[in-house]
Image: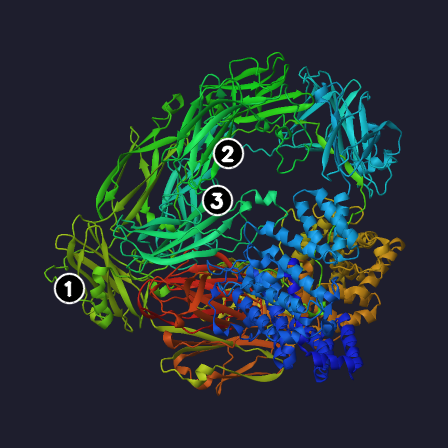
Amino acid sequence: MRQFRTVTCVFVVLSLLLGMLYLPLRLSMAAEPKQDASWRKQQFEAAQQALQKGLPKTAIKHYDAIVPAAIAEEDHDDAILAMGMRASLRGQLDGGGAEDRILHLQQDMESAPVASKPLLQAVLASWFYSYQQQNQWRFRNRTEIETREDDSTPIKSGEDLKTWSAQRIIRHASTLFDEALEDAETLQATDLESIQRLITEGNAPESYRPTVYDFVVNQAIDHFVDAHSIYSGPIERFELEANSPILDPVADFLAWEIPETDLESPLRRATELMQDWVRFRQSNADEQNDAFLDANWNRLRFAEQNAVGSEKEERSLAAMQRFLSENQSHPISARASFQLAQQEMGKEEFVRAHQIAKAAAAAHPDSFGGQQCAALIQQIEAPQLNIATERVWNPALSESAQAEIEISYKNINQVHFKLVSLNFDELLNSGQMVQNNEHDWLRKFGEEPAMQQWSVDLKETADFKTKVHRIEVPKDLAKGSYMLIASVNEDFVWKENYLAGKQVWVSELALVTDGRWNQGTLEGHVLDSKTGEPIPQATVKIWTWTNENQPRNSRNNGYRYRSLPSLTTDQNGHFEMKAEQGTNLNNLLLLAQNGKDRLPSQQHHSIRHARTSNQLSGRTVFFTDRAIYRPGQTIRFKAIATNYDQSKNLYQTHNQKSLQVQLLDPNNQVVETLDLVTNDRGSCHGSFHLPTSGLTGQMRLIVREFPRGSATVRVEEYKRPKFEVTLDAPKDPVRLEESVTVSGRATAYTGAAINDATVRYTVVRQVQYPIWWGWRCWWIPTPPAEPQTIVQGETTTDELGRFDVSFDAVPDASVDRDSEPTFRYVITADVVDTTGETRSDKRTVTAGYTTMSARMSVAQPDWLTEQEPVDIQVHTTSLDGEAQAAEVKIEVWSLKAPEVVPQPRWGSYQPLPVDADDEAQRVRPEDPNSWPLDELQSSKTLQTDANGQGSWEVSLPKGHYRAVLSAVDSAGNSVSALLPLRVINPKADQLGLPIASLFVTPQSQWEPGETFTAVWGSGYEDAKALVEVEHRGEILQRYWTSGDKTQIEITQAVDESMRGGFVVRVMMVHENRLHLHQQVINVPWTNKEWSIRWERFVSKLKPGAEETWTAVIEPKVVDESTKAQQDSIMEMVATLYDASLDVFAKHRFATGFNVFYRDRSTRSPHLNNGWQHLSTVVMWSHRGYPSGELSYPDWVSELQLNNHFGRPMPMARGMAFAESDMMMADGAMPASAPMRKSAGRAMLSVSAAENEVASREESDGTPPESNDPEIDLSGIPPRKNLSETAFFFPELIADENGGVKMKFTMPEALTRWQLLGFAHGANLSSGTISGTAVTSKDLMVQPNPPRTLREGDEIELTVKVSNQSAATQTGVVALNLSSAASGESVDEQVGNSQPKQSFEIPAGQSKTFSWRIQVPDGIGYLVYKAVGSTGRLSDGEEGYLPVLTRRILVHESISLPIDGAETKTFKLPKLLEGNSDTLSSESLTIQMTSNPAWYAVMALPYLMEYPHECSEQTFHRLYANLLARHIATSDPRIERVFEQWRNQPEVAGRVTLDSPLAQNEELKSIALTETPWVLQSKSESEARRNVGILFDTNRVNDQADRLTRRLIELQKEDGSFAWFDGGPSNDTITMLIVTGFGRLQHLGVDVDMQVAMKALTHLDAYATKLYERIEPEDRNKAHVSPTVAMLLYGRSFYKNQPTAPEHKEAVDYWTDQLAEHWLSLSSRMSQGHAAIALHRLGRLKEAKEIVASLIERSVVDEQGMHWNDANSGWWWHQAPIETQAMMIEVLDEVAGDLQRVELCQAWLLRQKETQSWETTKSTADAVYALLLRGTDKLASDEVVDIAVGQQEVPKGNVEAGTGFYQHRFSADEITPEMGLIQVKKTTSGIAWGGVHWQYFENIENITPHDGTPLQIEKQLFVVRATDSGPVLRPIGDEPVRVGDELVSRLIIRSDRDMEFLHLRDHRGSGTEPVNVLSQYRRQDALGYYQSTRDAAEHFFIGYLRKGTYVLESRCRVQLRGNYQTGMASIESMYAPQYNSHSESHALEVK
């Protein structure tokens, strides 16, 4: 079953085909021999032999013969096996992977005999599900399409399957399984033996699964169980309850009626099948008891795996015990015993587990369960040992501090030890590193006489649990170095033993080293390790581990220890070593020596210098008026330039200096440059006018020169939001199983309530496991828990905009309560205003099995003193962190402290069981938190307030305490919290606490003028510590404390120079332990912090009002340092912008300059003593461990579904688009149009008072006339100034009192405004301020216009009227439309016959009114004006409304590929047929490239030089340039044609040497500057022009000489190369370089070979090294790899250079390996290497076999000869273009097959048609393969003839070389006959071109342009929330409402790899996009850049691999009406002849 096996089991379903034979048929077949059986066997063997030779097509021929013969004789075994193999091979050759394999098998099933179909259905079911499992990453972001009746419909193609959703695949698989099991009786009557050819036997007895039914039903159960893991289902979904009969006796289980809930549940279906299976097996129990018991046992395991509920463990245990007792005599009972023993193991009841397993193993030793139990016994009884000790043993320490040896063991009774003396000087001279080399030392010194030897008897581990035993180290040892050796065997043997060792030192010294990183210094102390007293005049010897001036060897590469001058400690035991400036010292070994006592450092040290610069640092800080803009708007900015020198505390502005500020677009191109000059405060300001077109996304303001700086802003086409939604936390505690209510509110940015709005909400439950799950239960995968929709519904906001969402907090019953889960309920509320606008919010509510959390805290936990009471703060909250009042009880207890100061312990403690209740066992003496409670000191019960806060002050004497809080939550659950307390007496001179060391300070920061105070203390009676105060690397204080005072006060006067802080360090060595406290003391730059306060600020303003605000700037702290600054002039920048824009991009000002010094220490003292585990050098051989589940029959590997994965899709490179016909004169949309991205649904609704009006509108489409004609609206001025920035004041100068004034006129937009302010002075002091204001009116008229309209739209425009006065208001509102060009009214033309409507609106509420209009053709841009008045109150708004034409310029292209001398005919069906009356042609452009081989010339690489390159890059540059030069100069025509390109740059309407991205602008729907590929275009254009350098012989030769010299410098003495200079030899790099040189020479390139010849011996040595890595007994196995193939390929270039005798054996071995095992190479390139290498080495037969295989695996189609394998990837041997070049080389050199060479070249050249080849070495190889192999591709200058209709296409102005020409027919020249295109070529070779037809068509009449190599399909769905989550429903099947979310499902299909694709998806005018921000995204393995424009979504795909992809584009409906949603189109920006478009979908919104 799947829960017991891996997912791959699913693949095996193929075999199921065989079992469909009826029992009588099987019996007859068994009785009568098959006539053709031997023949078919021969065919199978022949097919297998073909596959072993890599000949799949030959194998398919054999399988093709087998299938009909086997079917004719009704031998379904052979038929199915052949079908499966054939389907797999066909799928691989087709290149579609698993999809095509499934398709081929499906086709076989459709034509197979009826009797075989059930098994075929089962096979396909498993394959479908396996496919889904393998491709989860593709389906992750794909929305589910709701179940439809055709879900069981077979797939149409492999590409069709790629468009399915995950659940559809699962449902299809489930249907197939159900169909397979329909005829269960036949399967039950068919023996499994009948399909033996299709299955492999497991280790289970055959009697367990005797029939085909047993086999198939278990496959189905596995599938359904797995499917359940990703099944959401309804909230009342089926769960397998543990208290159900699933674990009852068999009779009760079979009588169980499974609940009729959630009938779609896969788990429910699995349970049904389990019941059917057990019932079938019980009915045959008398004859087949084994099978019955096996089924029943698997039923219990099924329940154990899938049941839920608190009773599961208990009931599962009881069921297994019952099964065991009932079947004790049967071998299957041993499996139950094993499971029971495993459960006991999980509870650490090893004795009980051992007893159970031992009994079962004895009773049934040969059974699988008995073998499992025997292995479990071995595991329990297996010995375990781990030994550790300190590095330094000091016999002078006190008894309690003596070093110990820790023995952690199990099942071992005795350990033997010995100490062997080591000679340190001998170790130094050994040529090996001194540290961590125990294996060598043990080999070398292990047999030396032992200084001491002893044995340790260990207590028996009768409970089989690990124990820890400690022993004292030996006494009376002489000082020095030893090897401690441990062994279980008393003879210390090196086999079947535990043997370990570690170097230890006996010494009384403590060596403390302190490497000052990047300070050029190494210092330290030599101390007495017992007392910590300094040792003066101690010697410190130093060695460096280096290979300087040393001969190299294979052991250590020539490294040795070289001595350096020694050091001597001063009176404080201190020593210091400095390196000369500019010199680094590495791998330093130190040895401290005092007399005969010596101790080396534990590790090597290094001394390095920091890179210092005396130059000033600088930074420019930008401030902009806001964070997001629309194209065409203006960015206003301020820049403050600063410079600083932290070493001198110099901080100032960069005054009166030039500053160049640039604006960069998303393509990193300069849009505009401003040259500015900073003022006396280092600031300047300016503005940039954003372009109206270009790529949207992030733009940057940048200063490139000193002082550099940059800022990012967004340029997007957005629409300003009008309101916001907030969801509040629940008011009451959230309890599981109870109702929860979350309140929300919708509020306009003006503050007005959004009443009568529709609220659509969903609540989704997620499971969250506690933080400890990952580390405490690391062996258990996090249980899967799919998000579950709890409830979804709809409500309405009240008159205050409020609404409630209520739901039941239902827990997930499948999650074990003991895992302490919490459940997160994610509430999403989409509020649809009556205008149609939608805004959303989310709130997460958390619930668990408790409802409250409590914690305690104190303000200064480290500084609690006797002198002040301890103030304990209590905090009680819900699980969401919301405050919650509660009653709590607090008790303060003293702790039982140790009587003496405990030695800080190293090593392990005795492992404790989880439920250990012995308090003493839990104590860690050195950890006060483990100390037990002693006496209750005080207690108090208190009530926390509404904020969840409470406090209690308690006075305590010096000591350790623990505060214990207890409470009961609202559900009656206990809640607790602990708080450790440590109280000191800072005035005492003795610490008096049993802790080793303490360092505390009373506050966290200090100001200049204050005296820093800290307390250090130790609980030891005598303690001596080194105190250091360090600032900026200099020691201000350094002194040793007196030993008699164990508590001291540390003080330091803080002055102004110490801003940025200083470091205090206290170091004490005591009893061979280092106690170190190092803390950075914060001295903040408060003198640079100023505050800004409002003196006058008005937060409620009228639109258009004039206002003045004043603020005061003043220092936060007034002291001497800031008084001097108060007279300095402060400058302020302030902006006031529309706060609604923060929804898209939050705007922030800098809070300071962040350049001020922060102190830190480079010192890090380290005691060269530590805890170390003995290094194990010998270990017992592996003991057996219990295997997994019993294995049952499975499909043979030939019938398993496998998949190949290619390289991951690279991210796309950008995207953008601007609708040029939609921009206003100033480039900006009207301010009323922008709207934030919709995250929710929108729905147009009317209040109850409007129902009558609404019904009249619906009846005739006419709005009601105003019944209040007396109100005159003509004189009401509409609001027009809707600017998004109210003001931006870049240079507000404070007066002498620090005051600044801001005088401004507010825009007329109704919204909330955000103010940000930043003030600074010349010394970089700064301060910030913020505030919000609102512009509103008592009566507000706010229209919600769409971004655009389109001719032909019928749409309702909405206007909201809000009454914010205190009384009900009545009046009239009107909407008028006029022409933007003439200003004349167009109301009549659009059907707005009654523009006025009357209103009556209660106080504080609003109403929405709508006008249905029809947009006629040719109306042009409109101006809308909405005004309303009550006679006293009035308001209005006016803005532009773009109208798009319904006439769409459609571009349809077809490619014109032609190969060789032929005539081909192509068609443009729509032009030929002329079926549309509304279509009018615009142009017809014919393009033809007669000889595209010249594009390969343009791709020739010239790689520029860069400094500091590695050896590989250096060689690749040399290789590429030399080969490219060779190609370029191989034919004089190349230089001649290139000169023509250069001298006549523009031919045939294009610049020849420009990138194709920059050509054909007139044929593309978007300009290059609108894309993210400007840089790529420039790069390719530059590379094309650089081809000219290759003709400059002197330049190329000079560069080749430099590169060659560089390689010689990088080459080592032995001929090898390092990756980088100075690094170790790298065999792979050396191999690549040697191979490359050989290849260059082989290709005829003039190259200096001295570097290669020197490295050749290293290449042979590399072969030997690889050979020697293989154990001799394994050398007959396959060991070939891409590296081996490359090595022999490289060596074959030097076959005239004989292999040295010492390497010949290895080279011959690898040659034989390659000849025998070449097919195991995973990449074709490596197989190509093998073919050429073997061919050159004389192994012609094997080389020919490889070629034959490559040919059979190839595909020949209209693109040429290529391979459909998954060859691409990240490795060098997987590059697709380079691989194709290698195939050409193989077919040319090995096969001499010119015809296939030409076909491969054709495919390779066609890749250049749609892809830009990078300037690399691989491109040089590809161009060589195209131009210098086979026939002369450049010879032909024939121009291909083209005729359209009966008219020849003129060929004027033909491009040199390529033969490119084009001709454009204008509209009046185009006739329908031109839809027939004839292309004629008279010479060999390929050519390509394209026909580009541009025509105008009404959007509703556009039909898809498909059948092309690149296709796009658009499907439109509406999203609907269901109990199982969101699903998609087709818009034709589902009414669409305002607020609905629409999904445009875009299906892309391509039959070849392509780069630089632009996809555009239009939207309907009444919709609003969900996405607003341009950014890179990823869907369906496709990376792209997405940008939202006003009329369409744009996707830019940088790289598209051949295949099918699904993208989803989302928008929301905001307006009712009937309108078109527009088409989707896709085009290649690189090859415009490849494009496609869909039709437009009409949308009706009720």
Q: Earlier in the sequence, mark 2 or mark 3?
A: 2
> Percent position (x, y) of residue 879?
45, 42
In x, y percent, where is residue 40? 77, 80
Q: Quadrant of residue 1408?
A: bottom left
Q: Are marks 2 and 1 in contact (CB under 8 Å)?
A: no
The foreground one among 105 and 92 is 105
Q: What is the CA distance from the residue labelled 3 to the residue labelled 1?
A: 60 Å
In front of the other: label 2 or label 3?
3
Judging by the rendered image, the residue that carries numbered circle 3 is 849
The type of residue carrying mark 1 is Ser
Rounded to the nearest angstrom, the CA distance separating label 2 from label 3 is 60 Å
In the rendered view, does 1153 fall on the left or right side of 507? left
Which quadrant holds residue 244?
bottom right
Residue 360's place in the image compared with 2019, above or below, is above
- Tell me how far mark 2 sits from mark 1, CA to CA: 73 Å
Disc sitting over residue 1266 in the figure: 1
Q: Which residue position holds label 2?
A: 616
